[in-house]
């Protein structure tokens, strides 16, 4: 019987893993199943797959359920699924990102991280004028709403849900979630990028310019204290007595640097939204240099891809 590629891949990989984990030879498995050793080899190399009638025997040999033979790594591990989504994001494959994240969100309903990838994929697909089905967009909205109801502090998800609803011209719904965002954050003002067009957007940007510059000034003052903060972290690490405390100190330093990088990119976004493109480009360069200096290139790319403006998309390639 003909087998599709995903079936061959999943079953072949699982047979190989189960066999190697149990330290069983291909010949031993072949003898049990009454087939040639070369057939097992072809399964594991994904050249062909077992006939469905053989699956109960294979499952019985390894002591697993038949379902276990079909499971992919992403279905076993949310971390593996997230890795797949990060790869799609790095490739700017926004359509596949949205669709794949929807699959994983259904498989792992308690993991809210998938919701953010769904919404990012949907928003960026619309921004890039990529074809997305109405059913996919509706699923993205529904999962976004469910997650927002369960996690009122998930501002990144709420922000992207607002952006998606505004892009879909569902402003009344978007306004409800807009009110859930903390007024002190930049998120509300940044949504003008999605909410308004034409003269209405120009008016909103002008009204927000004062807020943007206040945010920039505050962020720059925080960044100015970096050397002192890093010095304090180093001193704490030197004084730490236990391995756990030392590990915490190292984690604290990395997190501190990541926050500063986020601030630099937020400054870039604020300048961009206030129409100061040269300063936005300068802030982008500063953030890029900062990431290289502190070994945060992957984190920088991840941040940029999640919040990239259409005109900057070529910088991500």
Image (cartoon, grey):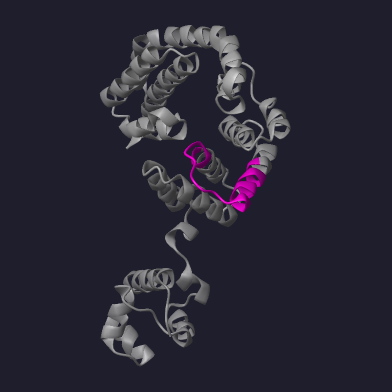
Measuring from the top left, give residue 314's x and y in whole percent.
34, 33
Measuring from the top left, give residue 97's x and y in whole percent.
47, 48
Residue in the foreground of this view, choosing between 199 and 315: 199
Horizontal side, residue 190 vs residue 171: left or right = left
Residue in the foreground of this view, choosing between 202 and 288: 202
- Residue 222 sits in quarter: top left
- Say which residue appears at 39% left-offset and 28% top-offset: 312
Q: How many marks?
A: 0
Main secondary structure of the magenta stretch:
helix
What span is colored magenta in the figure? Answer: 124-144
- Say which residue appears at 46% left-offset and 82% top-offset: 55
Residue 241 at least partly seen: no
Residue reaching furthest bottom?
Answer: 34
Q: Is residue 140 magenta?
A: yes
Point out the image quarter for the C terminus: top left
Q: Is residue 310 magenta?
A: no
Point out the image quarter for the N terminus: bottom left
| In the image, residue 83 above or below residue 193 | below
| In the image, residue 88 above or below residue 2 | above
Horizontal side, residue 201 vs residue 82: left or right = right
- Say which residue appears at 60% left-offset and 48% top-offset: 110
| In the image, residue 203 above or below residue 9 | above
Residue 21 at least partly seen: yes
Measuring from the top left, give residue 143's x and y in whole percent.
64, 46
Measuring from the top left, give residue 165's x and y in whole percent.
64, 36
């Amino acid at each position: 019987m003909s087998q599709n590629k995903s079936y061959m891949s999943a079953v072949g990989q699982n047979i190989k893993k189960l066999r190697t984990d149990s330290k069983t030879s291909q010949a031993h498995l072949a003898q049990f199943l009454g087939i040639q050793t070369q057939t097992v080899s072809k399964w594991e190399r994904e050249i062909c797959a077992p006939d469905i009638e053989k699956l109960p025997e294979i499952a019985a040999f390894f002591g697993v359920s038949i379902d276990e033979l079909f499971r992919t790594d992403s279905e076993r591990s949310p971390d593996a699924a997230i890795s797949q989504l990060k790869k799609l994001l790095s490739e700017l494959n926004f359509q596949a990102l949205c669709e794949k994240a929807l699959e994983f969100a259904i498989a792992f309903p308690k993991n809210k991280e998938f919701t953010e990838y769904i919404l990012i994929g949907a928003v960026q697909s619309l921004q890039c004028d990529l074809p997305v089905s109405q059913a996919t967009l509706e699923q993205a909205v529904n999962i976004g709403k469910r997650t927002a109801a369960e996690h009122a502090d998930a501002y990144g998800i709420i922000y992207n849900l607002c952006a998606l609803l505004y892009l879909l011209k569902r402003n009344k719904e978007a306004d409800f979630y807009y009110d859930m965002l903390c007024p002190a954050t930049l998120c509300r003002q940044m949504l003008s990028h999605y909410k308004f067009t034409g003269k209405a957007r120009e008016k909103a940007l002008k009204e927000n310019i004062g807020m943007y510059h206040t945010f920039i000034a505050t962020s720059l003052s925080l960044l100015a204290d970096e050397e002192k903060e890093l010095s304090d972290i180093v001193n704490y690490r030197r004084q730490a007595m236990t391995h756990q405390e030392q590990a915490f100190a190292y984690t604290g330093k990395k997190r501190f640097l990541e926050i500063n990088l986020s601030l630099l990119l937020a400054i870039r976004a604020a300048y961009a939204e206030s129409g100061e493109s040269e300063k936005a480009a300068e802030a982008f360069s500063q953030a890029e240099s900062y990431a290289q200096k502190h070994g945060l290139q992957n984190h920088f790319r991840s941040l940029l891809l999640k919040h990239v403006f259409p005109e900057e998309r070529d910088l991500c390639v």
